[in-house]
Image: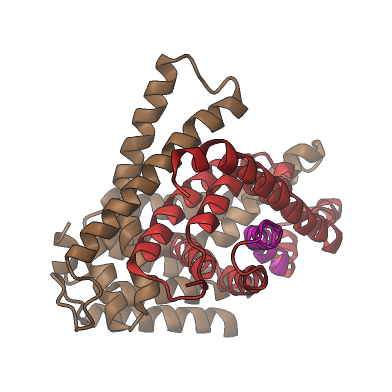
Chain colours: A red, B brown
Amino acid sequence: MKTEKLRIKDLVTIGVFAVIYFVLMFLAGIIGIVPILYLAYPTLAGIITGIVIMLFMAKVQKPWGLFILGLICGLIVIAMGNTYVILAHVLISMAIAEFLRKKGEYKSFRYNMLSFALFNTWICGFLMQIFLAKDKVIEMAETRGMGHDYIMKLIKLVNYRSLILVYIGAIIGGIIGAYIGKAFLKKHFEKAGIV
Amino acid sequence: MSTFSDNPYNPNPISKIGIVILLGFTVFHQINIYFEWAIIFVISFLFYKNGLKNDALKNIAFFAAFSCLLPDIVIIRNMNPFIMMFFMLFIVCRMIYLPFSAGKFFIKTSDVGSIISSMDKIKVPQNISIPIAVMFRFFPSFREESRNIKRAMRIRGITFKNPISYIEYVIVPLLVISSNISDDIAKAAETKCIENPVKKTRYLSVKIKTVDFAYMLLMLVMILGGILW
């Protein structure tokens, strides 16, 4: 009963929740317009989307459910014009998240929480692709005749340390989101008989 | 919608998504500016031939704005760092622009049926193709439901001024309704024998046309040429 294959009902649930997750994630993405705050984007997205993913995890307690949800998000992002880096990042994040869920047998809240925190790190892929293309940014800036101090400021903004901070932020946001999700599950969805 | 797939200048979704991924390489490797312009013009030409004249013009105009306005930053250099950070975003937009415009071409000119039947063609497993098909089916009703819920909440005096309660009162009904809809969709799909393990017949079939070869070949030549130049 515990580890059976995904049925049609679960696949449809994945599709529906992918839409909700994506819409909420983009709503959180409005913060990215303010220049420095986009480093906090993964944290905010984790806090907001925690409810959706925790409900999803409660509904689909089967292997590969979360993996497919994340993979579809990655594919959509690619279709809207991003690089292959984000797809690789999605695969790695989802594999770890799926492994953690398997360890908790898809039920235990602690492992689901950790799994969501790692699931949430895939959003860092957006920043990762900027980070990996840093050389090109510098080259482009030099050919356009921007001053040396300007380039230094750019490098200061995107370096290893802030990237690690972004990852930590994503994990913390995920944990907060998971707790909010748990509270909501108890307050609303269990009463309504959805889970 | 089906006018798109009849158009001889519309490549099939497989080659369009392939091009988006290929253009991802241009983000990490410096490409000659003339080749970049050539890529933009090819995409604009395809936009034009598919009847999206405004998008063709916008595509060129945005790229021109991004690549020609940047030198003016020299003047702004002495201003405060916050504005500079803003221009960092500008440069990022400029970098991502090539794959972004190819992705826009993919989204604007492919219809749902051809995307699904092309997923059949490259043998995407059912576990991935069914959720994607459901997403296309669910998105319009999701928009409608969320509009209704927002209106109902406005009547009760819950607006965005108090974000936390707003999120609670909008997201919870939305999730409840969505999970009911998802149960309905699953029942409907199962009564239509979606699990029947036979080869499915699609309303639209994907063909490989000359424009696919031309599009792929042109883009490959330009990306390789731009990197090696």
Count the marks: how many? 0
Using the image as rendered, state which of residue A27 and residue A148 is in the foreground: A27
Using the image as rendered, state which of residue A187 and residue B26 is in the foreground: A187
Quadrant containing the C terminus of chain B in the rendered view: bottom right
Against A158, residue B21 (above or below) is below
Q: Position of residue A96 (x, y in %)?
A: 67, 72
Using the image as rendered, state which of residue A53 and residue B10 is in the foreground: A53
Q: Is residue B87 visible?
A: no
Q: Is residue A23 visible?
A: yes
| Residue at screen point 38% across, 45% down | B178
Q: Position of residue A116 (x, y in %)?
A: 64, 58
Quadrant containing the N terminus of chain B in the rendered view: bottom left
Q: Identify the image quadrant of residue A34.
A: top right
The span shown in magenta is A108-133
Against A102, residue A195 (above or below) is above
Q: Is residue B118 left or right of residue B34?
A: left
Q: Position of residue B50 (x, y in %)?
A: 22, 61
| Residue at screen point 19% across, 70% down | B193
| Residue at screen point 28% across, 79% down | B120
Q: Residue furthest front?
A: A1
| Residue at screen point 71% across, 58% down | A110
Q: Position of residue B14 (x, y in %)?
A: 33, 76
Question: Does the segment drawn in magenta span residue A122?
Answer: yes
Magenta stretch, main secondary structure class = helix
Question: Does the segment drawn in magenta span residue A131?
Answer: yes
Q: Identify the image quadrant of residue A111.
A: bottom right
Q: Is residue B4 left or right of residue A170?
A: left
